[in-house]
Image (cartoon, rainbow, N blue to C red):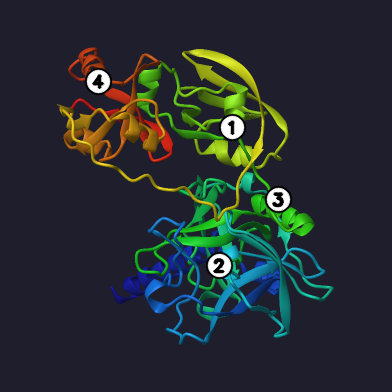
Amino acid sequence: MIKRLCQSGLLVCLWVIGAGTALADVLPDFRALVREHGPSVVNISISQADPVPAAGRVEPGENPHVPDFLRRLLPESPEPDAQEIEQSQGSGFFISDDGYILTNAHVVASAQSIQVRLLDRRVYSATLVGADKRADIALLKIEATGLPAVRFGRPEGVAVGEWVVAIGSPFGFENSVTAGIVSAKGRVFPEESFVPFIQTDVAINPGNSGGPLFNLAGEVIGINSQIYSRTGGFMGVSFAIPIDIAMDIQAQLRSGGKVERGRIGVGIQEVTPALATAFGLSTLDGALVGMVEPNSPAQRAGVAVGDVIVRFGEAAIQRSDDLPRIVARVSPGREMPMEVIRAGVRQSLRVTLGQWPNAEEGATAVRRAPNPSEALARRGLDVLVPNGARLKTIGAQWGLEVRKAEGPAGRARLREGDLLVAAVDAGKQTPLRKLDDLDAALARLGPNDALTVLLQRGAGRSFVTIEAR
């Protein structure tokens, strides 16, 4: 009996050892990658005067242009005195052997001096060649040669589920290595529509910002930039800027010190199933035009509100997020072909691109001037007809202004001050100039049909669907 138990135990041990060996054969080994490419990664530290009073300071790792759930990867630091020099750290990597370094723009923002520390402990002063805040890319230069530059991969060839490795300086711990997989591709966030982020589950923390993301071939496919966090620390979701976009930007920074992006001057939105029904579309592909800026390239090209842009140049527009980054990569002044679907018919247009303004320029919010009038409550809507002065303030020729949005209208995220400009039915837009126009639009719908309206909020317009209940 004892002999049989010993034999069984030996078999179990052998099975566990065999399984462990097989598992070791399957899992990747990152040692060679780190030995070869670790020296290409540098630690970046900056010093800057603190010009912002404590009450108005943006907390470390935060940025007003980034959604609340995203955090820039800057380490926490003690509260400085007014005249004290702040120190912060990040990561970067050599893209050439003569001292050019890529990192994030927020790593070196407002820097008075920049120091770069190599793996072999050499320290250099770096100069800022240029920075692009929109894409969060900065290019640095140190005076040295014979440096270990990285190799570049193709982000479009990256597959969801493949292994990736990050090297950087989390919390100042230089040349730290973490690994994981690609979780998703093409993530786009508000105010950052030029960058289709690579999402990973690689452990990324403050100080990793600007460091490289490698594939198993030892090629850089991205720059670690942001994390999803409610605490400021890693929660299993991180984002990297694709390296091809970063290299396009650094080439412009190196040649001219700034980045120029094409624009056509439209406000767009995703084609949802409800909007596809309202516009008589057979697919959800394309970018739905909710606004055309006056005297813009799009207006001069003949683009109209309600058009669905399905192709720009040689690129098909599958999602609305595709259009801004495809247009932005075309030089201003260049004429490009584009295709739109208008009232179910595919049309070809040609547009000469304009140029994006500086990233610091922003829109001015419109303040609501109360103007009592008769109200109409439909699907939770309480609206009024604004007078001419109010319409002039809003920048519209007609519309119904929302005083209150409850029920279905509230769930559609309408709010006080919104302007309902038109109702959409079978792709046709009917202006909403008076209360009877909205009544008529609702009367044409079945009891379970959704109401689609063109909504103006501030200077922007978009289509919104209000369900029946």
CA–CA distance in space, label 3 to label 4: 49 Å
**What residue does disc 4 label?**
438
Dot in front, 3 or 4 = 4
Q: Where is residue 294 in the image (x, y as percent from the top left)?
A: 53, 31
Tell me the kind of residue under disc 3: Asp
Q: Does any portion of residue 153 appear in the rendered image?
A: no
Q: Which amino acid does label 4 sit on?
A: Leu
**Residue pictured at 21% horizontal, 37% vertical:** 403
Name the residue rendered at 17%, 32% in the picture: 380
Q: In the figure, residue 444 lies in which quadrant?
A: top left
Query: Closer to the N terminus: mark 1 or mark 2?
Result: 2
- Identified by mark 2, the residue type is Ser
Q: Is residue 353 positioned above or below 133 on the image? A: above
Lower sequence index among marks 1 and 4 = 1
Q: Mark 2 points at which residue?
A: 209
Q: Earlier in the sequence, mark 2 or mark 3?
A: 2
| 267 displayed left or right of 334 | left
Along the line of sight, the residue nearer the viewer: 322 or 412: 412
Residue assigned mark 1:
296
Alpha carbons under labels 3 and 1: distance apart: 26 Å
For label 3, the SS is: helix
Q: Position of residue 87 (x, y in %)?
A: 55, 82
Seen from the viewer's position, the closer of residues 14 and 63 is 63
Q: Which of marks 4 and 2 is nearer the N terminus?
A: 2
Q: Nearer the viewer, mark 3 or mark 1?
A: 1
The image position of residue 302, as x and y in percent, is: 58, 21
